[in-house]
Every structure is written in C-alpha cells, then in structure tokens.
Image (cartoon, grey):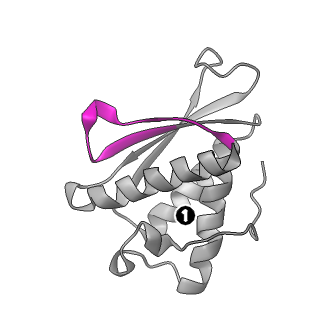
Amino acid sequence: MELPLTAPTTGTVADWVPVDSCTLPTREQPLRVAEFDHLFAAGLRAVERQHASATQARLVLAGDEGLASPMQALAEAETSCCSFFTFTVTTLTPDAGVADRSAVALDIEVPAARADVLAALVERAQRARRAAA
C-alpha cells in the first residue's frame, strides 16, 4: 500500500504535537499529517482506549495485505521526530472482525505529560474516518 505524499490536508503535526516537541521540519509537517489522514480515512475501524488510560490507545485499521508495512514506516518516522511516542504495529488474525482484509492494530503510548497529544491524535483519526464515510 503506497501512501500519497501530496494528499490534501487541513493541518500540521502541530495540531496534535506541541511545536517544541517535534523536530520534523515545518515544511514537511503537512505531508506527515496527510500520511496519517490517508491511513485513518482509508482504514480506521475502531479506537480502543486501553485500560481507560489517557496514555494508551489502540487504533484498529483494515486494508490491503501490505497495510502493516506502511503503518510501521509511518510509526517509525513519527517516533524519529517525536520521541515521546511509542508505537507498536501488530498484524491481527482474520477473525479480528475484518473479513477478507488485512487488519492491523496500532498501539500508541505516551508519557502522562503528553496525554493531550494522544487525545488530539485519536480525535484526528476519528475525524478522518467520519469524513471518509
């Protein structure tokens, strides 16, 4: 699954990450947001808050067989500029509620001081999903 690098977007990484926490050059931020938005709009199926925690979330996405690879690449890219994120990408079994498609869980964890960042990212994911529906 190839991600479009020129997808339209209405935000920057700063929409969910404080400017002082992100080392991604400002001119590249809209491209990163577009990558996240594309994945969320195309495949977000569920958002789970783990253990009612403000510091953990699981996003379940469905898509083509190769979905895990671009998801992992995006997670690594985001961690390289916002090191407080911990992302874990897990390929789910077909019985995870998504028939005939690959299902991937993106587990996200942040320190308590960055719970607002996780909340903003989850909200962006949900908005992208609603906009695509």
Regarding residue 84, the answer to whether it shows in the image is: yes
Vertical placement of 47 versus 28: above or below?
Answer: above
Q: Residues within 10 Å of mark 1 (few under 14, many from 20)?
A: some
Q: Position of residue 86 (x, y in %)?
A: 39, 52
Number of marks in picture: 1
Q: Is residue 113 on the magenta stretch?
A: no
Write the residue at 45% across / 56% down: 121
Write the residue at 72% across / 69% down: 8
- The residue closer to the viewer here, 41 or 91, is 41
Q: Position of residue 63 (x, y in %)?
A: 72, 37
Q: Which residues are magenta?
A: 43-59
Write the residue at 69% across / 48% down: 132
Regarding residue 40, the answer to whether it shows in the image is: no
- The residue closer to the viewer here, 58 or 15, is 15
Amino acid bearing label 1: Ala
Q: Quadrant of residue 6?
A: bottom right
- Could you tell me which secondary element the residue under label 1 belongs to? helix
Quadrant where the C terminus sits is top right
Q: Position of residue 47 (x, y in %)?
A: 47, 37
Taking 23 as reference, is 2 left or right?
A: right
- The residue closer to the viewer here, 92 or 55, is 55
Taking 97 as reference, is 132 left or right?
A: right
Q: Which residue is mark 1?
A: 77
Vertical placement of 75 versus 95: above or below?
Answer: below
Write the residue at 65% across / 65% down: 34
Residue lying at the far left of the rendered structure? 112
Q: Position of residue 31 (x, y in %)?
A: 65, 72
Q: Is residue 46 on the magenta stretch?
A: yes
Taking 51 as reference, is 64 left or right?
A: right
